[in-house]
Amino acid sequence: MALTKNQRRTRLRNRIRKIVSGTEARPRLSVFRSNKEIYAQIVDDVTGKTIAAASSRDKDISKAKGNKSEIATLVGKSIGEKAMKAGVETISFDRGGYLYHGRVKSLAEGAREAGLKF
């Protein structure tokens, strides 16, 4: 039986999460992509706390013009700046079962531009 797109992504996501987990020294940058928006949060999995979060629905980003990939780059820069303020420099990247391509790649590059290392 063929899997749906969401079932396939969930399987991939679970496989990635077995390997990638966030610690206090190196938290996890988690990405969620919907059809319209993109969300990113930096999570310390040991304590279960979200250190920083950014999305395309934030007030400063939602006013920006551009295609979805350009907006994703802005979200990446925003999450990078918030992480630097919180004292996080290195992270492990969790693409959430999505291919490292398009909006997910743009977000990662934006975060790297803001100074995050991964």
Image (cartoon, rainbow, N blue to C red):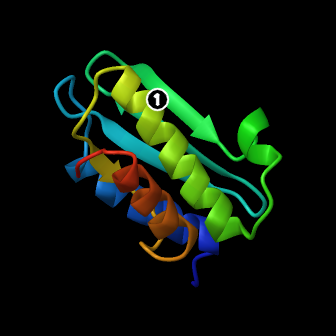
- Measured along the vertical axis of the image, is residue 75 above or below residue 41? below
- Report which residue position mark 1 lands on: 82
In the visual, does 33 lie left or right of 118? right
Residue 55: horizontal and vertical position, in percent?
A: 65, 42
What residue sits 21% from the left and 22% below the top? 24
Q: Is residue 14 visible?
A: yes
Q: Which amino acid type corresponds to the residue marked 1 in the rendered image? A: Lys
Q: Nearer the viewer, residue 24 or 65?
A: 65
- Measured along the vertical axis of the image, is residue 117 above or below residue 107? above
What residue sits 39% from the left and 30% below the top? 83
Q: Nearer the viewer, residue 58 or 99?
A: 58
User: Badge 1: few (under 14), some or many (20 or more) residues near its Cα, within 10 Å?
Assistant: some
Image quarter for residue 2? bottom right
Q: Secondary structure at mark 1?
A: helix
Residue 50: horizontal and vertical position, in percent?
A: 45, 23
Residue 99: horizontal and vertical position, in percent?
A: 45, 74
In the visual, does 25 lie left or right of 64? left
Q: Quadrant of the N terminus?
A: bottom right
